[in-house]
């Protein structure tokens, strides 16, 4: 649980302080991985159904899908604005 809390804190710090979209995405992945670690840790107490491990597997699959979508959005934003700094992107048009 302590490892999950440290990973969550590191991810939250990255999301709040970084100005690069890729680094913000890495921070979000840290937060998701902290949740997965806690699911597996709590799954230790469910010896018969393995619910923690099953939920962790679903969380990993959803995190991979979210990362693929986020990277596609970042690439399209870079093509349009020639930057990945979220603070410099101030207009959204059709």
Image (tube, grey):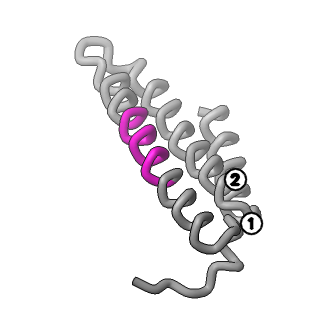
Distance between the alpha carbons at the discs numbered 1 and 2: 8 Å
**Disc 1 marks which residue?**
19
Q: Residue at x 70, y 79 (%)?
A: 88
Q: Position of residue 90 (x, y in %)?
A: 61, 86
Q: Residue at x 39, y 37 (%)?
A: 59
Magenta span main SS: helix
Q: Position of residue 81 (x, y in %)?
A: 63, 74
Q: Is residue 13 left or right of residue 8?
A: right
Give the extent of the magenta segment. 59-70
The secondary structure type at the circle numbered 1 is: loop
Q: Is residue 47 magenta?
A: no
Q: Image height check: is 89 above or below 34? A: below
Callouts 1 and 2 close, C-beta under 8 Å: yes
Q: Position of residue 43 (x, y in %)?
A: 39, 23
Instruction: Tell which of 10 and 91 is nearer to you.
Output: 91
Q: Is residue 65 magenta?
A: yes
Quarter of the image with the N terminus is top right
**Disc 2 marks which residue?**
23
């Amino acid at each position: 649980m302590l490892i999950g809390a440290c990973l969550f804190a590191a991810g939250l710090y990255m999301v709040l302080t970084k100005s690069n979209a890729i680094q913000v995405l890495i921070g979000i992945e840290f937060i998701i991985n902290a949740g997965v670690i806690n699911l597996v840790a709590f799954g230790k107490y469910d010896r018969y159904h393995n619910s923690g491990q099953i939920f962790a597997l679903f969380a990993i699959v959803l995190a991979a899908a979210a990362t693929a979508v986020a990277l596609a959005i970042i690439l399209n934003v870079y093509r349009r604005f020639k930057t990945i700094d979220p603070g410099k992107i101030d207009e959204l048009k059709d």
